[in-house]
Amino acid sequence: MNLFAANDVPTFTGDRVVATIAAVLALVGVVLGVMAAVRAARGVGNRGRNGAVVALALAAIGGIVGAVVVATADGGLGTGNGLAGGVVAIVLGVVGAVTGGLVLARSRRAT
């Protein structure tokens, strides 16, 4: 019995790479959104406006690319189509976009 048969070895397919990049973009959007929220709460600089715009853009791009990966996936989880990464990118994209949008709205209200 071969534990490392050719069919059992996970490889990075093109869809998995795209989904992973989308998830990383969305994660960076979430991190920047939280950092912008902290800056807005402290009243530092422009109250996190620039960070909120970048967070909103990155999270939206990551979420949209993740949605495209999920929509074009041929199989389920574990088939190499990047479905799990696409779902993670969508969730992180929504969280990052909401965080960036809230900070952006707060910064507009404060000025």
Image: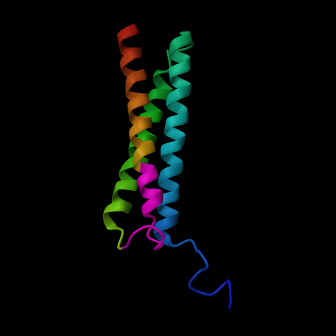
Which residue is painted at 45% across and 42% down in the image? 58
Tell me if residue 74 can be seen: yes
**Left or right of 105 on screen, residue 28:** right
Tell me how the rendering is colored. Answer: rainbow
Tell me if residue 111 can be seen: no
What x and y, as percent, mark residue 16?
50, 66
Which residue is painted at 53% across and 32% down in the image? 32
What x and y, as percent, mark residue 42?
56, 11
Q: Residue furthest front?
A: 1
The answer to whether residue 54 is above or below residue 106 is below
**Snapshot quadrant of residue 91:** top left
Q: Nearer the viewer, residue 73 or 77?
A: 77
In magenta stretch: residue 85: yes
Which residue is painted at 42% across and 36% down in the image? 95
Q: In the picture, which quadrant includes the N terminus?
A: bottom right
Q: In the picture, which quadrant includes the C terminus?
A: top left
Q: Residue furthest left?
A: 71
Which residue is painted at 49% across and 38% down in the image? 29
The answer to whether residue 73 is above or below residue 65 is below
**Left or right of 18 on screen, residue 108:** left
Q: How many marks?
A: 0
In magenta stretch: residue 94: no
Q: Nearer the viewer, residue 84 or 98?
A: 84
- Magenta region: which residues? 75-89
The answer to whether residue 6 is above or below residue 45 is below
What x and y, as percent, mark residue 20?
52, 58
What x and y, as percent, mark residue 107?
41, 15
